[in-house]
Image: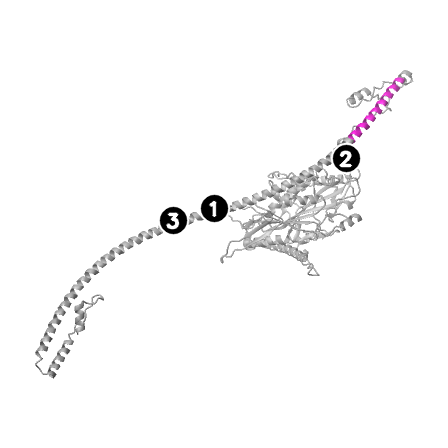
């Protein structure tokens, strides 16, 4: 909560007496829907608060995965309305009670950050739905335009009704002189679809005004997107960041526009978006080249004792703000294929995001290791305009929420640092701020009493003025006929002239008529008092009935919220199951295709094996025929050779027998010769015969028959 001016001593003591409790940064994660069915997701939703990422195996067969937990996971089936109800609606309730908040949308380029924050005409984002909820809630309690005006020091001055009318006339004259400054819709624009939701539990004895501002941080310079410049003019004057008297950071000299309805605020938002720096890259056709900060500030001032006018004491004014930050997406130059100016812009974007990570990391380390170190490390807020602007939020001036947007078809190396940063941010704690309702000692329900009196006002009795000039006679009969249907004031007064007052009879008639009218007036007064008391008693009964009905409504709302939470849980479970079912269907289709492919390959291989078997049988049959023919041929050749060798052996055997007989004859003829002479003859004869020694005959490795063996042994 941010307060303008000095605070009363009682309020300061109350504020300082608050405990130093801390709340963690609430981090949400939203998964962008997959555009094509051919693309595969690397993210799996484990539960409402946990997701898992994984990458396919690399060349070495190693696959990596990681699991991260957040406050809530918005799946690809979650609508813009569901995201706003969980993320933005509680912050609007805090905003109207005087508490400031901050939302970061963080992610790589093309992950859906800008769509989540601003949306489109048909499906509004967080910013447009904030407009609808705020103005639906305060439409009966808004202050007159120009009642509050910025004081250029991050505060607001309060003006009277006369001053507000004067400022309004001056603004009308300026718009007449410069009609180009007034915002007009283009011919091609279509009416947006409003978000019908209203916060009931708001303070009614205050007056509200809404101011908006829109800036961008480009190349570490702050530029005003709502600056009053002509079309096509380049904004070269950057703004500086200052600190106000309460320690809150703000953009000095920024143009804050007072808006009176959601359409007017949305028109200013559209005007600022047209000036925002965007450029096409390889990853995104409309890539943001700067960080944009859209700020909604609600100014509250209490009503006076009458419940009509606003107390103009500046110290009672309460200012709360909601900053919606659309961070430019981090990107890699190689993948985004940026060169030149786009490459420099990407470098500045990555540098500022790196500084944001560093600040949160040091803040987390200082909190987690405070007991181990005596001196905490200094946080470099001033290194970047982004962290410098929101330094007061990190130090406890409001609650912080972060939305991590991821594209499920991104690479594992790109998603891992984003999800790690989101999980680390959820561990950072900031000081809790308590919304402060203004209590200045006045009777509560002042506005309500005035509204009831204006609706249920009792008509007063019209009393005639007896001091009427003589020339202007009052037609009392026509007057009483006019009010006869409502009140009867008694008999009509007689028509008298001045001279008739001297007549006692006519004067007595006038006195009698006046007495009757006085008596009737007393009766009507008594009747009025009785009816007023009855109405008051009825109002008391109605208020008691209203209090009972309100309690019953609160209990029913609690039951409804419980049922709504159960419905949301069942819806989330159904979404998870549908997601799982879709994933299983994709796996089943993949397995069916793989099965069909394997079956076709198996059939082809079976056909090939059958063909090989047929070829083998044919070849076997062919070789068997050749073997049979070869065996027959070899058998015939063997038989022919065997016959030839057998004939040769028979011839040799006959020759040997002849020689043996010859030797025998020689031996017998030499028996009568002397011994020494006969031995020489026999020796010589044997030596001559040894020259003609017959070698054993072998046919194909087989020995000859027994006769041949005997001859061989003999020689």
Quote the CA–CA distance across marks 3 and 2. Answer: 90 Å
Stretch in magenta? 508-536
Q: Is 666 in front, or is 628? A: 666
In the rendered view, would you say 663 is above or below 197?
below
**Residue 522, percent from left and from top:** 85, 25
Is residue 366 visible to us here? yes
Residue 503 visible here: no
For the residue carrying disc 2, how many other residues have a C-alpha within 10 Å: few (<14), some (14-19), or many (20+)?
some
Tell me the number on the disc at residue 450. Answer: 2
Residue 673, given in percent of the width and then of the height, sits at 8, 82
Residue 333 highlighted magenta (yes or no): no
Quick one: label 1 or label 3, which is nearer the N terminus? 1
Disc 1 to disc 3, C-alpha distance: 21 Å
Between residues 592 and 339, which one lies in front from this camera angle?
A: 592
Residue 278: horizontal and vertical position, in percent? 60, 49
Residue identifier under label 1: 589
Report the side of 96 relative to 530 (left or right).
left
Where in the figure is residue 127, as x and y percent of width and height?
64, 44
């Amino acid at each position: 909560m941010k307060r303008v001016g000095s605070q009363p001593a009682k309020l300061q003591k109350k504020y300082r007496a608050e405990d130093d409790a801390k709340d963690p940064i609430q981090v949400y994660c939203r998964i962008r829907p997959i555009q094509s069915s051919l693309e595969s997701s690397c993210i799996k939703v484990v539960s409402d608060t946990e997701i898992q990422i994984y990458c396919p195996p690399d060349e070495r067969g190693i696959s990596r995965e990681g699991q991260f937990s957040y406050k809530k996971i918005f799946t690809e089936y979650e609508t813009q309305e569901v995201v706003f109800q969980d993320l933005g609606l509680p912050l609007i309730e805090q905003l109207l009670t005087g508490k400031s908040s901050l939302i970061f949308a963080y992610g790589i380029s093309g992950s859906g950050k800008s769509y989540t924050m601003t949306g489109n005409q048909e499906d509004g984002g967080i910013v447009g739905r904030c407009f609808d909820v705020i103005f639906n809630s305060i439409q009966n309690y808004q202050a007159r335009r120009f009642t509050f005006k910025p004081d250029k020091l991050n505060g607001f001055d309060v003006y009277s009704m006369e001053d507000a009318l004067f400022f309004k006339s001056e603004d009308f004259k300026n718009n007449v002189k410069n009609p180009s400054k007034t915002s007009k819709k283009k011919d091609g624009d279509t009416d947006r679809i409003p978000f019908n939701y209203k916060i009931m539990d708001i303070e009614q004895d205050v007056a509200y005004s809404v101011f908006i501002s829109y800036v961008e941080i480009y190349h570490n310079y702050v530029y005003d997107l709502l600056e009053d410049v002509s079309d096509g003019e380049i904004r070269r004057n950057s703004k500086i960041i200052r600190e106000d008297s309460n320690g809150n950071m703000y953009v000095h000299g920024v143009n804050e526009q007072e808006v009176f309805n959601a359409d007017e605020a949305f028109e200013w938002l559209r005007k600022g978006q047209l000036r925002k720096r965007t450029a096409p890259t390889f990853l995104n056709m409309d890539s943001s080249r700067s960080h944009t900060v859209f700020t909604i500030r609600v100014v509250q001032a209490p009503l006076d004792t009458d419940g009509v006018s606003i107390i103009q004491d500046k110290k009672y004014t309460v200012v709360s703000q909601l900053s919606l930050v659309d961070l430019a997406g981090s990107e890699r130059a190689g993948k985004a294929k940026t060169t030149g100016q786009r490459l420099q812009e990407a470098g500045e974007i990555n540098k500022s995001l790196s500084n944001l990570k560093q600040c949160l990391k040091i803040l987390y380390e200082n909190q987690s290791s405070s007991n181990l170190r005596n001196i905490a490390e200094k946080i470099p807020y001033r290194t970047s305009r982004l962290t410098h602007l929101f330094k007061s939020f990190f130090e406890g001036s409001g609650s912080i929420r972060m939305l991590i947007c991821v594209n499920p078809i991104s690479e594992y190396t790109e998603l891992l640092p984003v999800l790690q940063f989101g999980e680390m941010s959820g561990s950072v704690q900031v000081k809790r701020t308590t919304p402060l309702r203004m209590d200045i000692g006045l009777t509560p329900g002042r506005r309500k009493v005035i509204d009831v009196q204006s609706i249920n006002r009792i008509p007063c009795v019209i009393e005639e003025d007896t001091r009427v000039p003589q020339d202007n006679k009052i037609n009392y009969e026509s007057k009483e006929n006019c009010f006869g249907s409502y009140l009867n004031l008694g008999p009509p007064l007689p028509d008298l002239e001045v001279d008739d007052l001297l007549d006692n009879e006519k004067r007595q008639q006038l006195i009698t008529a006046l007495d009757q009218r006085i008596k009737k007036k007393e009766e009507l007064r008594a009747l009025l008092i009785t009816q007023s008391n009855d109405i008051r008693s009825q109002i008391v009964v109605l208020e008691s009935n209203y209090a009972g009905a309100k309690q019953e409504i609160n209990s029913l709302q609690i039951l409804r919220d419980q049922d709504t939470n159960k419905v949301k849980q069942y819806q989330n479970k159904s979404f998870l199951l549908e997601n799982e079912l879709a994933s299983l269907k994709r796996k089943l289709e993949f397995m069916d295709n793989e099965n069909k492919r394997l079956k076709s390959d198996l059939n082809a291989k079976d056909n090939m094996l059958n063909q090989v078997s047929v070829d083998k049988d044919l070849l076997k049959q062919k070789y068997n025929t050749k073997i049979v023919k070869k065996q027959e041929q070899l058998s015939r050749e063997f038989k022919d050779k065997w016959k030839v060798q057998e004939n040769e052996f028979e011839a040799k055997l006959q020759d040997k027998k002849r020689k043996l007989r010859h030797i025998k004859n020689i031996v017998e003829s030499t028996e009568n010769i002397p011994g020494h002479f006969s031995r020489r003859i026999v020796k010589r004869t044997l030596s001559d015969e040894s020259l003609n020694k017959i070698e054993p005959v072998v046919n194909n490795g087989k020995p000859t028959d027994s006769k041949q063996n005997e001859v061989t042994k003999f020689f």
